[in-house]
Image (cartoon, coloured by chain):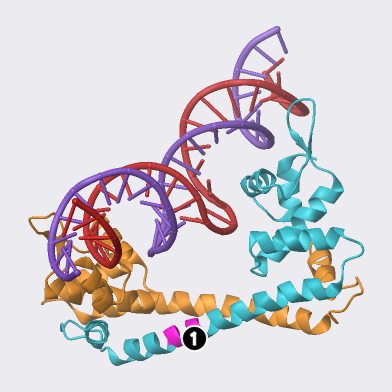
Chain colours: A orange, B cyan, C red, D purple
Amino acid sequence: MNIGDVAERAGLPPKTIRYYEDIGLVTPHRGANGYRAFTEQDVHKLAFLARARTLGFTIEDCRALLALYEDESRASSEVKHIAEEHLAQIDEKLAQLQQMRDTLAHLVHACHGDDRPDCPILSDLACKAS
Amino acid sequence: MNIGDVAERAGLPPKTIRYYEDIGLVTPHRGANGYRAFTEQDVHKLAFLARARTLGFTIEDCRALLALYEDESRASSEVKHIAEEHLAQIDEKLAQLQQMRDTLAHLVHACHGDDRPDCPILSDLACKAS
DNA sequence: ATAGGGGTTCCAGTCACTGGAAGGTCAAGG
DNA sequence: CCTTGACCTTCCAGTGACTGGAACCCCTAT
């Protein structure tokens, strides 16, 4: 299968698939014309990657998960460990983002947003800054 | 004032301050020895930037906010507009992250995480992928 | 023969820094 | 006066995960 069809089926742009080959996540064979020739297994792997990426795993996480996926004798605890670490990072990021959101929402709410120059948002940025 | 002291007072690493000069956010004068010589105003601007960045504004947002901050005849609506757009982006990101978190938490919960190889996390990655 | 829609490589850019090397400057201590 | 160490300078390269574009090749249909 050519890269375009694979891209459609795996839900990844061709550029990204080439990039994944560059960094060794997939290793499709080549046809006589130099085109990449993907197997069903390759497509499956790429779709696996696409799914893992939408869940926010880093490329290196993906590499590890893929290795575990292909290791029939893996321990599920290894997978769980990676996922838990990732979950903890997401939670941390969520908390930070929520904090930012609250502060910003408060400021936006306080700003009347008209033609006059006085603005609580700028005041906050300047005052908290000093 | 030298860059080290400014860094401390503004809460930004020296490297970052040099970078901000590179991209034209601040333009400190230079002493006879070639060192950057920061004024109180520079420090204030840098602290303003630091605060805006912790609120997640992009550098380009910061540039615009700084320009508005220095424009005595600005309309607060302009500031509010930038902040509202940013808030909307944060909300979108929060929703995505929350969605990711829920899915991942569910999977982590479902995985027994022992020595056996069967793992709902990998199953999900593979199945949703097919 | 040609036109189009694939495919290929390689280089550069994104964002906001950050690390490191190589070298100049300054203040304090011996 | 010399040295030491902390500070400053510039410049180059790397981060993560792609993405855009140029220049070129290949395949199919008309």
State whether the magenta stretch is mostly helix, strand or loop.
Answer: helix
Mark 1 lies on residue: B98
Numbered disc 1: secondary structure = helix
Which quarter of the figure has residue A10? Answer: bottom left
Q: Position of residue B12 (x, y in %)?
A: 67, 53
In the picture as drawn, the residue positioned furthest to the left comes out as A32
Q: Which quarter of the rendered picture does the C terminus of chain B lie within? A: bottom left
Residue B10 in view in this figure: yes
The chain carrying label 1 is B
The image position of residue B97, as x and y in percent, is 48, 81
> Residue B89 sits in which quadrant?
bottom right
Q: Nearer the viewer, residue B72 or B107?
A: B72
Closest to the observer: B66 or D15?
Answer: B66
Label 1 CA crowd tier, 10 Å (few <14, some 14–19, many 20+): some
Q: Nearer the viewer, residue A46 or A34?
A: A34
Residue at image x 75%, y 75%? B81
Q: Is residue B83 left or right of residue C11?
A: right
Q: Nearer the viewer, residue A17 or D15?
A: A17
Asked if residue B98 lies in the magenta stretch, the reply is yes
Residue A48 appears in view: no
Task: Indicate the quadrant containing the N terminus of chain B: top left, top right, bottom left or bottom right.
Answer: top right
Q: Residue, x 84% and y 66% (percent of image)?
A: A127
Residue kind at label 1, given as amino acid type: Gln
Could you say which quadrant of the image residue D26 lies in?
Answer: bottom left
Write down the region rendered in magenta: B96-101
Measured along the vertical axis of the image, is residue A52 above or below residue B98?
Answer: above
Percent x, y of residue B35: 73, 32
In magenta stretch: residue B104: no
Q: Residue at x 92, y 62 (%)?
A: B72
Q: Residue at x 75, y 25 (%)?
A: B33
Q: Is residue A29 left or right of residue D10?
A: left
